[in-house]
């Protein structure tokens, strides 16, 4: 038998999830280094191909093309519609089953959305922050999620750039910012030259 406080907690959590507001977003959700990363961008930009490349590097697919997102408290939980769960559409190859090709560890059921990466055509990116000091945000259900915008052009390895953006994000949330460190170093050198 379940203790009454445990039963109340279970029922409360169940109801919160069942009654949570839900939307569907066109994108790809992938688990990279334990973070739920929502890949955004117009159709045909290369989101699914990027996800496939990340899967070959050991990361996990949560959803391709349609991502179901629920807001539960202050969290955004993403998963895949049941029909297309574990599948990825790759132009030229068609629909592929990731579990069949890469094994059970290459797919997941749901994930908190921790980061957004938007892929945009190079000529559609108005201004590129070359230092990486500015952080953009994507608003979903009134919650703001950190977002990187990556310009896409032929010859750029998008999956490597996405993986690097995620590594940078992990460093930043742990208190290290390479761009800020470079500016501090530059300022120190300028002060030393001025004082000599």
Image (cartoon, grey):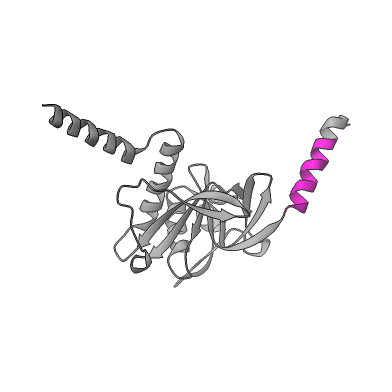
Q: Residue furthest front?
A: 195
Q: Is residue 155 left or right of residue 43?
A: left
Q: Residue at x 14, y 31 (%)?
A: 194
Q: Position of residue 7 (x, y in %)?
A: 85, 35
Query: Which span of residues is magenta-colored?
Result: 8-20
- In the image, residue 101 sits, relative to residue 115, either above or below, namely below
Q: Is residue 52 left or right of residue 77?
A: left
Q: Residue furthest bottom?
A: 92
Using the rendered image of the protein, determine whether residue 2 is visible from the camera's viewpoint. no
Q: Position of residue 28 (x, y in %)?
A: 53, 59
* Camera-side residue of 62 and 162: 162
Residue 9 located within the stretch drawn in magenta: yes
Q: Residue furthest left?
A: 196
Using the rendered image of the protein, determine whether residue 141 is visible from the camera's viewpoint. yes
Q: Quadrant of residue 80?
A: bottom right
Quarter of the figure that contains the C terminus: top left
Q: Is residue 19 left or right of residue 155?
A: right
Quarter of the figure that contains the N terminus: top right
Q: Position of residue 177 (x, y in %)?
A: 37, 37
* Camera-side residue of 54 and 10: 10
Query: What count of labels does the image hold?
Result: 0
Q: Residue at x 69, y 44 (%)?
A: 73
Q: Position of residue 121 (x, y in %)?
A: 37, 67
Residue 130 located within the stretch drawn in magenta: no
Q: Residue at x 22, y 31 (%)?
A: 188
Q: Main secondary structure of the magenta part?
A: helix
């Amino acid at each position: 038998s379940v203790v009454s406080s445990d039963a109340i907690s279970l029922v409360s959590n169940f109801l919160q999830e069942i009654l949570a507001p839900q939307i569907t977003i066109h994108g790809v959700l992938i688990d990279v280094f334990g973070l739920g990363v929502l890949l955004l961008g117009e159709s045909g930009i290369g989101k699914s191909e990027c996800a496939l490349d990340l899967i070959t590097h050991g990361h996990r697919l949560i959803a391709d093309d349609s991502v179901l997102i629920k807001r539960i408290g202050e969290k955004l939980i993403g998963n895949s519609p049941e029909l297309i769960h574990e599948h990825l559409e790759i132009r030229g190859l068609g629909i592929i089953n990731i579990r069949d090709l890469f094994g059970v560890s290459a797919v997941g059921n749901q994930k908190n959305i921790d980061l957004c990466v938007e892929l945009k055509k190079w000529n559609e990116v108005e201004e590129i922050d070359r230092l990486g000091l500015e952080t953009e945000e994507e608003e979903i259900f009134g919650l703001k999620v950190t977002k990187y915008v990556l310009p896409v052009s032929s010859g750029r390895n998008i999956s490597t750039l996405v993986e690097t953006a995620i590594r940078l994000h992990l460093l930043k949330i742990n208190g290290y910012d390479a761009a800020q460190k470079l500016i501090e170093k530059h300022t120190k050198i300028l002060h030393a030259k001025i004082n000599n």
